[in-house]
Amino acid sequence: MTRKPRLLKPTLYVHDYIDLDSLQKCLEDRRSDFVTIDSTTFSGELELESRPYERFFVLERNHFTLFSHYHAPVKFSYKSRNAVMSHLWRDDVFTDMTSTKFVEVDGLWQLEQQPVLCFAFGQDADTLQSSYVIDDNTIHEYYESTVTMDMADLATVAQGKADLCVSHFFVVNRGKEYWAVDTNDPSISYAFSPSTKTRTISRLVDGSVTVQALIGEEHLQSSIDAGTSQNPKFMLRDINGEEVVEGDRFVLHIPGRGDDDDECVKQTMFDEKDWVSVSYSTHLIPRREAMLSGSMDRGHTFRMAVVDDTTYLTFEGQFVLIENQGRRPGIVILPETPSKHNRIHLTYSDDGLIALSRWGAKVPIILEWIKSACGFFSVDDERCIDDSAKLRLIKV
């Protein structure tokens, strides 16, 4: 969902005993007004009475306070200052944000998740924009020289903030370039773009991936990219490693659900498994065409064809390809040989499964289960190659 434009420029009243340099820096500070106040005479409540339809913050020694006519003053931990300030455009900042993301610790509200430490080149900082809470939940440091950007020095700073921020990585920005850096080994860094920033940082924050794992995914993608030109040495293989040639019939098993059940209670190899099948639907594409889908029923039989040294999946003499019409491209069955943009690239992942992706691009083909027994293949530009649909090829 697209965020509303920010309607307010945050005002921060700073008690005269506060040293601003001692506070953790926030990106929102660069778009805020700071007003020094006399700590002996200032009253947030009285100030709110004179500004009944505005919201503002008061910076105090160990916390900051949000004043709003929607609720009583709310005290927040400094850890989450940027996240709160960046959502000031919400009418009821506190209620909207605390419903799912904030917790109260020792009388102060803070995001459940620790903030991410980001290093930004000072001259670029004013152009940086936050898009989602994951980007807002940050503490920033600034470096002013691009001649030497020593990751080891930045890691030392990050290690000193381990109790304030996510401790296992930090982010470095320069213009439109970003790096995720391993705090404990700054020689390990992963470069990413603004378009993948939210997803990359989200995965690192929730612990589903490490910086080293992201590098491994990139290497896997590089091997896919290297193979997207015509490769006469490519060999389609079944689950036993045997070569599949034109004329061989096979089914495509979708590993996952039901695979750990006791094999003894199954009457056949097809029981309690998910298979690639062919169905007719207008769910993802406007025309009624045969589509590749997932099913708990026994899968359909496929073959392969080699045209100009390129290997294709086929079904009843027609080609399996990417259909580019509709909300999201789907996988369909058509008689014509696919153009390069419509081809499906087949590659083998480290676990021996066949991974599917769009030919010549870092765009995975994914399988989404919309019902317990029905799923559809589609192409998703916002997902990473690690999300690719993976299949087992079984000769029949």
Image (cartoon, grey):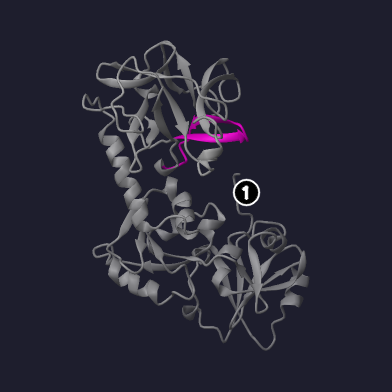
The C terminus lies in quadrant: top left
Dominant secondary structure of the residues highlighted in magenta in the image: strand
Classify 133 as above or below 366.
below
Residue type of the residue flagged with mark 1: Lys
Q: Secondary structure at mark 1?
A: loop
Give the x, y percent position of residue 50: 76, 71
Q: Is residue 12 above or below residue 137?
A: below
Is 353 in front, or is 362? Answer: 353
Residue 140 at least partly seen: yes
Q: Which residues are magenta?
A: 365-384
Q: Nearer the viewer, residue 264 or 37?
A: 264
Residue holding disc 1: 4
The spot of residue 233 in percent (x, y) is: 21, 27
Q: Is residue 100 left or right of residue 244?
A: right
Q: Choose between 165 and 261: the one closer to the eye.
A: 261
Drawn side of residue 253 relative to residue 36, left or right: left
Question: Which picture quadrant has residue 209?
Answer: bottom left
Camera-nearest residue between 295 and 44: 295
Residue 173 part of the magenta segment: no
136 relative position to 344: left or right: right
x and y percentages locating residue 73 in the rendered image:
73, 73
Number of residues whose C-alpha sits closer than 10 Å to that of mark 1, classed few (under 14), some (14–19) or many (20 or more)? few
